[in-house]
Amino acid sequence: MKQRLTTSWTWRSVALLLFASAAYSGDAWAQNVACSSLPGATYLQGSAAAQSYIAALSAANAGTISYIFQSSDSCVAVSSLITSGRLQGTATYWVAGPSGPVANPCDLDANGTPVDIAVSDVYYTTCPGFSVPLPNGLSEALGPIQVYGFAAPRASTQTAISAEAAYFVFGFGAAAGQVAPWTDDTRVLIRSDQSGIQQLPARIINTNASTWKGVTTPVATIISTFGSATNPDSYIGVLPALFADANRDKVKFLAYRHYKQRYAYWPDSKESLRNKRNVRDGHYPIWGPLHLLAAPPQQITPNVARFLGYFNGNTPLPQGLNLVDLEIAAHTVPQCAMRVQRQSELGNVSAYKPSNPCGCYFEFKNDGATSCRACTSDSNCNANETCSFGYCEAR
């Protein structure tokens, strides 16, 4: 749905995130196994957006391969991979349980552990210090589409923001911008220039992520602050759909009007839905794929190649796992649900026709309904349609 601008994996994946956060505090991890003692130990660092996938794949491979994860900002993980940085402290691995993956802590080596796979919300050349592609490149698999946005407290009366307004709010702050009602820099809650959550919105409005105005704030604190704000109209921040959609009682995305657009658009066709239709057809621009990065192809281990292969189609998924369902449950958009694509960070969009479209299935899983016709074979569909994921999709 368009709006004119005014002046002024589900409970389980969330539970896993909460468990992992809680487990890092206190003395609960006093008796941890050594990560290096786990079978097929393979180390991942980066965006929490991938944690539910890593959990499912780690649990499904338990006993053979252990995918061990430490959450960090995207560009911290990219730097660790490229500069041979080492993970320190504790990390998380998963085993199969009766109701899904069960998280467990493990201790990393005292001298640190090299990163095998960096999980990034952005292209590695977007990260500070890596603007030029590496001579030998990196192995890369693209995951689902992640959606970002300018967010406000649910109780805020503000519904939309333009690129021009965001440019002044985040690029210049209250001293120069004076974009009411966001005129108090202490109520502009941002991330860091190492985070993809900040890098993509900063680039879309033509600002430098490293000089944004506002208060650097953890995602969980942004959500809790928005939920309890006594003057909600004065607050604004940036969030991914991964967290905004999971906390709609506290947070909402503002409809966004990009430069030269006539209208502002939510990621979804209506603010109350989750179909990401305006992302999938190119009207809403703040999105990009998840990036799974590793050493150049000739240097990676079979376990690393296996993990990347789950996402680029070279590796069959373990029995019982459906990658599309995992991606939907994590509040991301499977590539098969997209109708547009990009070839670079926030580049121009072009038409995209996936070989196995799942847009109708995506809408049904998110909103419980779709206008598409259910089918079991192409014979149930019109001549210009194909039966895919149980629904008639345009060819």
Image: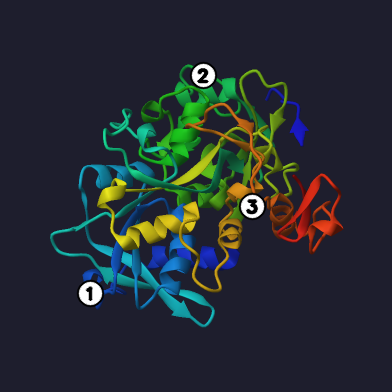
Numbered badge on residue 177? 2
Position of 272 with respect to 174 (left or right) is right
Nearer the viewer's eye, disc 1 or disc 3? 1
State how many labels appear.
3
Q: Residue at x 61, y 52 (%)?
A: 245
Q: Amino acid at mark 3?
A: Arg
Q: Residue at x 43, y 54 (%)?
A: 48
* Mark 3 surroundings: few (<14), some (14-19) or many (≥20) residues within 10 A: some
The image shows residue 119 at horizontal and vertical percentages of 39, 50
Q: Residue furthest left?
A: 111
Nearer the viewer's eye, disc 2 or disc 3? 3
Q: How is the image coloured?
A: rainbow
Q: Amino acid at mark 1?
A: Ser
In this view of the protein, which residue sits in the foreground, 237 or 224? 237
Judging by the rendered image, the residue that carries numbered circle 1 is 37
Alpha-carbon distance for marks 2 and 3? 28 Å
Q: Based on the displayed image, in which of its 4 quarters is residue 322 positioned?
A: bottom right
In this view of the protein, which residue sits in the foreground, 168 or 142? 142
* Mark 1 surroundings: few (<14), some (14-19) or many (≥20) residues within 10 A: few
- Image quadrant where one finds the N terminus: top right
Alpha-carbon distance for marks 1 and 2? 54 Å
Position of 88 with respect to 359 (left or right) is left
Judging by the rendered image, the residue that carries numbered circle 3 is 248
